[in-house]
Image (cartoon, grey):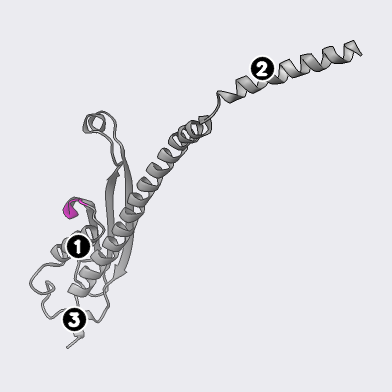
Amino acid sequence: MTAMLRVLRVAGATLRRLRRRLQGDEGSAIVEFLGVALVLLVPLIYLVLVLGRVQAAAFAVDGAAREAVRAVTSAATLDSPTGGDLPAGARAVAAVGIALGDQGISADPVTSLDLVCGGGCVAPGSSVSATVQVDVGLPFVPGFLRSAVPLSIPVSAHADGHIERFAQARP
């Protein structure tokens, strides 16, 4: 019987020591949650921001390339051989500037656009090819780091078009 009492006393003392250790953990779950949230959520939010900017740039360059080709091909269908008041190349640059600005991309449309015309830009039956490329900078990166390491993502799009063979024959 005394052996049984000793076991119970030892078990009771062990339980009391365990309770004392556990009493000091109040509030630690909140601290652990905040630590995990900072480690996981901040990079996740940054990733969403970067992907949003890259997606906006992808939409912008795709629309800009299509509109540049459309501006050149529609210039050939106007009454004037230069496409109205503006030459075909200037119309394409203006279309690229509008398309990039619509998505908030602040790139120079002249340097972003690569326009290639096969057989003359407004000649009937010729082909037009436009490539638009912009560099999307990563958000919240300090300027001194940008000058040391290129921290941008190049995004480009390509579009092709043809000027109709009977473009000048329209009334």
Marks 1, 3: nearer the viewer? 1
Q: Residue at x 29, y 65 (%)?
A: 66
State yes or no: residue 63 in magenta.
no
Q: Amino acid at mark 3?
A: Gln
What residue occupies the far right of the structure in this picture? 1
Q: Which residues are magenta?
A: 106-110
Would you place residue 166 above or below residue 12 in this image? below
| CB under 8 Å between discs 3 and 2 | no
Amino acid tagged 2: Arg
Determine which residue is flagged by label 2.
17
Residue of label 3 = 168
In the figure, is residue 58 to the left or right of 106?
Answer: right
Mark 1, other Cα within 10 Å: few <14 / some 14–19 / many ≥20: some
Mark carried by residue 98: 1
Q: Disc 1 residue type?
A: Ile
> On the image, which quarter does residue 130 sit in?
bottom left
Q: Position of residue 94 (x, y in %)?
A: 16, 63
- In this view, the residue farthest toward the bottom is 171
Extreme residue toward the left, this view:
85
Q: Residue shown at 11%/71% (left/top)?
A: 82
When the figure is inspected, residue 10 is found, relative to residue 33, above or below; the finding is: above
Q: Position of residue 1 (x, y in %)?
A: 92, 14
| Viewer-closest of 111 and 138 | 138
Q: CA distance from mark 3 to mark 2?
A: 96 Å
Instruction: Name the front one of labels 2 and 1.
Output: 2
Q: Residue at x 19, y 71 (%)?
A: 122
Residue 72 or 8: which is nearer the viewer? 8
